[in-house]
Image: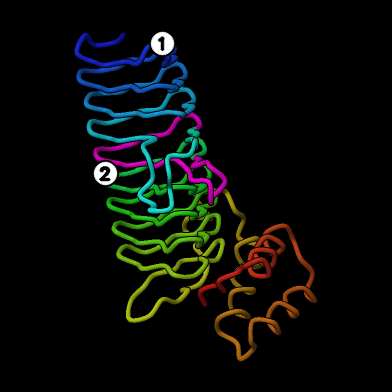
Amino acid sequence: MIHPTAIVHPSARIDPGTSVGPYCNIGEEVEIGPDCLLMGNVFIEGPIRIGANNRFFPNSVIGVAPQDLKYQGERSETRIGAGNTFREFVTVHRGTKGGGGLTSIGDGCLMQAFAHVAHDCRIGSHVILGHGVTMAGHVTIEDHAFLGAFSGIHQHCRVGRHSIVGGYSVITQDVLPFSKTVAERQVKTFGVNKIGLERQGFSSERIERLHHAFRLLTASRLNTTQALEKIRAESLNEDLQILVDFITSSERGVIK
């Protein structure tokens, strides 16, 4: 299943069920699980561990050294779960000493063409990065988040689970879980990501509880501390606890 034009380092470990297409270059300390597809001209550099059933479209570049001037060639790695798709010209850089030495991607993600995952980023599962999404180092994207085309994410920012970031947004603070957030003249939250939550099976009652919390946070005359106190006083379910914990743990502040 390895094309004769492919270059594979002797130390690379490739499952027999994986297909390596023409002109791929597989480097040292690369481990690729079963049923993966490398279509052609894919460049993968180790140390890296790749799970099962991942697809790499032509000209994707995975696991290479970071674009961080502090990086001095120290050992670092990349880990990729199962069932992900990396479209044309996607780039994923391995970690640095300053970020724990690891860039990680979960399961079932779609990285659309020209998306960039920088060093020490933590990407959850079932995340979609739109065409040309670019993130700086040390970014965390939580499960089921969707980032619209050509969005840029500042280093050390977090994007909360089940949120959607509108295309061409510039994100310089944490994005709230469950939210719709877009940059126009200024970056602001536009309430709950209702359609996305419905697609994930959230009941109308769960969504309404979140709507109410977002109204307290963004549309009332309460400041953030007062809004959190009121949300806590009205009893927390699991979703609201996630929202409260996300806000209280933010180091850069959250977008409202």
- Secondary structure, mark 1, is loop
User: In which quadrant will I find the N terminus?
Assistant: top left
Q: Position of residue 28 (x, y in %)?
A: 40, 21
- Dot 1 crowding, Cα within 10 Å, few <14, some 14–19, many 20+: some
User: In this orientation, which residue lies closer to the viewer: 30 or 216?
Assistant: 30
Given the image, on which type of amino acid does mark 1 rest?
Gly
Residue 75: percent from left, percent from top: 49, 35
Left or right: residue 27 versus residue 230 is left
Residue drawn at x 44%, y 77% as measured from the top left: 188
| Cα–Cα gap, marks 1 and 2 | 25 Å
* Farthest bottom residue in view: 221
Q: Residue furthest front?
A: 72
The answer to whether mark 1 and mark 2 are in CB contact below 8 A is no
Residue at left 55%, top 61%? 178
Span colored in magenta: 81-104
Please tell me in which quadrant of the rendered image residue 64 appears: top left
Against 117, residue 135 (above or below) is below
Q: Earlier in the sequence, mark 1 or mark 2?
A: 1
Residue at 49 percent across and 25 percent down: it is 51
Residue 128 x, y percent position in the rendering: 41, 47
In terms of secondary structure, where does tag 2 sit? loop
Answer whether residue 83 is magenta in the image.
Answer: yes
Q: Residues within 10 Å of mark 2 (few under 14, many from 20)?
A: many
Identify which amino acid the numbered label 2 is placed on: Ala
Which residue position is annotated with label 1?
Answer: 17
Q: In the rendered image, which residue does mark 2 sit on? A: 113
Q: Is residue 213 above or below residue 9?
A: below
Above or below for 186 versus 6: below
- 183 in the magenta segment: no
Residue at the (26%, 16%) spot, across then down = 7
Residue 210 in the figure: left or right of residue 131: right
